[in-house]
Amino acid sequence: MSVRTQPGPRERLLEAAHQLIYSQGVNVGVDALLKAANVARRSLYEHFGGKDGLIVEVLRSAADDDAADYRRTMDAAGDNPRERLLAVFDRLGEITATPGFHGCRYLAADLALTDPDHPAHEITRDYRRHVHDLMERELVTLGHPRPERGADQLLLLIDGTLAAGATRPGTDPAAAARELAECVIAP
């Protein structure tokens, strides 16, 4: 019996795509993906049906990981909804200060994929809806007078923090967003 110790073509494609799509965007070339994964073109089509399917799978798995990061961050902040929400902005400060930070992969995908029917848009919408729901639940627990609107505002601050963190290096957009989030949380 042989034991495979090296990842297969599907896993190598996913890993290469996670890295290249994040660093270069969804318009990264197929040849670059295949070279980085060290796989034949046939593997891309067998496992994902093509580049679009690979993009969708990369965004889906990233969304699961990123949503879990929000939950871990909030859980680590304790039970106070205010502190749980503000912890998100502290975490964004850490993320945007990380070397190699390139911004929000979901916003980048939405902007680059101009076909409104591209299946990746469903993943990005679901991800944002999930983050919105996390924020809204905390605001409901806090007794916020307009939790849905407050969650809209917090999501806007999150998106802005990630965009500014990528486009204005050396700044601290998370700190500014945290101050604004305090106003949203306690109107």
Image (cartoon, rainbow, N blue to C red):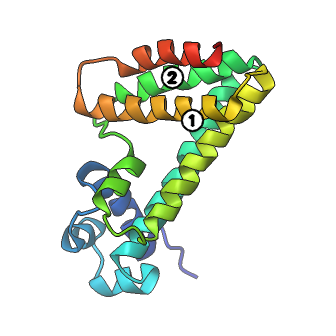
Kindly identify the amino acid type of the residue bearing the numbered disc 2. Phe
Please say if 158 is above or below 16: above
Residue 91 at x, y percent in the picture? 50, 25
Camera-nearest label, 1 or 2: 1
Residue 29 at x, y percent in the picture? 20, 68
Residue 187 at x, y percent in the picture? 63, 13
Q: Secondary structure at mark 1?
A: helix
Residue that label 2 marks: 89
Kindly identify the amino acid type of the residue bearing the numbered disc 1. Asp
The quarter in which the N terminus is drawn is: bottom right
Quarter of image, res 162: top left
Please say if 151 is above or below 18: above
Q: Residue at coordinates 32% horizontally, 63% vertically from top-left?
A: 113
Q: Is residue 80 left or right of residue 161?
A: right
Dot 1 or dot 2: first in sequence order is 2
Alpha-carbon distance for marks 1 and 2?
A: 15 Å
Q: Secondary structure at mark 2?
A: helix
Please say if 40 is above or below 20: below
Residue that label 1 marks: 152
Q: Residue at coordinates 34% horizontally, 75% vertically from top-left?
A: 51
